[in-house]
Image (cartoon, rainbow, N blue to C red):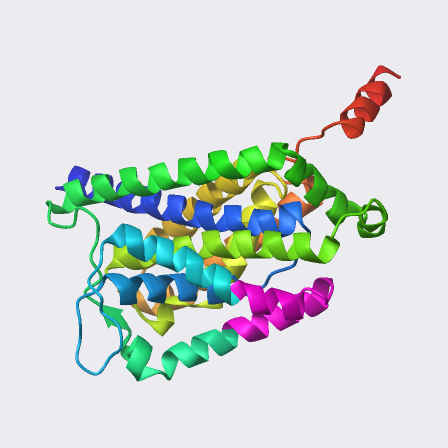
Amino acid sequence: MEFAGLVNYALFMAIFICIYALLALGLNIQWGFAGLFNAGIAGFFAVGAYTSAIISTAPADGRIGGFDLHFVIGWIGAMLAAGLVAWPIGKICLRFRSDYLAIATIGIAEIIRLVIKSEPVLTNGARGISGIPRPAGDLGYMESQIAYLIIVLAVLIVAYVLVERQFNAPWGRMMRAIRDDEDAARAMGKNVEFRRLEAFIFGAALMGLGGAMFAHFNRSITPEAIDPMVATFLIWIMLILGGSGNNRGAILGAAVVWIIWSVSEIATDRLPHEYAVQAKYLRLFLIGLMLQLVLRFRPEGLLPEPLRGDQRSTKSGADRH
């Protein structure tokens, strides 16, 4: 029984690593490629989760939706909804820069959370939506976990391959040029505003997909699940730790941070109750300490952004000298 419990928990962690890696990839498109400081990840996460829940759950009294459609349609709908929500937000907010953009996106995410919490007709308010079907959920518990892990891992691999292709394509080089020197890119005839909005929408769509996969795995979604600590700032830590601008770094950062986050929870839960409550703050301390050490000794992350073109030639020339 003890071995089976460990296997189940390992599967649980692997599923969450895949989901958070997808969210980190979405943030990498926005920040790593385009330099957009989106601090409202939780908002797009929530839009995707609730959209897929509404599409794929059975009809319920007193709530709009409940179309009882296949989960794949729900996931596609989640991406489309998150992208559609990102379009007007991007049109308005992307004119801001760095900290102003972060403040604006935090505010919008909080607005989305409050609307979800206070809108019983669409989201069932504070009670949330339950009965969300999990793919292969009719199998045994462990078999269901394995099946869902295969599904989310396949989605992550497809997303990684597509994003990596864009990173290496002219679109990716153009986005990095806009990120590094916006005025020079504009002088070369690039539509900077449109391309930044493009990256913002693409990243938001992946965040919406991550939210949908989270909701289907838990079989429910409530406003409490949209905690900015775990749905925004933890993802930023994953990307910074792994390496901004590197898709493999985003996935590695998601794995490292989530393993530390989960293992520290197990350790604190074994303490007596009066200490366990206080010890939970050690999780935040450990993550913060790790981030500080990375920023101090390896500010580019565990897997830095690959150097290409002239940068690689310059670096090689410097090494020869």
Q: Looking at the image, which residue sits at the far front?
A: 189
- 13 or 210, which lies in front? 210
- 298 or 191, which lies in front? 191
| Spot occupied by residue 244 in the image (x, y as percentages of width and height) | 63, 44
Q: Quadrant of residue 108?
A: bottom right
Q: Is residue 236 magenta?
A: no
In the image, the segment drawn in magenta is 86-109
Relative to 318, is 96 on the left or the right? Answer: left
| Spot occupied by residue 33 in the image (x, y as percentages of width and height) | 65, 45
| Spot occupied by residue 73 in the image (x, y as percentages of width and height) | 30, 54
Q: Main secondary structure of the magenta part?
A: helix
Q: Looking at the image, which residue sits at the far top?
A: 320
| Spot occupied by residue 66 in the image (x, y as percentages of width and height) | 22, 69
- 260 or 23, which lies in front? 23
In the rendered image, which quarter contains the N terminus? top left
Above or below, comparing residue 112 to residue 49 in the picture: below
In the rendered image, which quarter contains the C terminus? top right
Above or below, comparing residue 32 to residue 232 in the picture: above
Residue at 22% over, 44% down: 145
Q: Is residue 93 magenta?
A: yes
Residue at 49% over, 64% down: 84
Q: Quadrant of residue 319?
A: top right
Above or below, comparing residue 216 to residue 144 in the picture: below
**Residue 229 makes an appearance in the image:** no
Residue at 47% over, 75% down: 112
Residue at 85% over, 15% down: 320
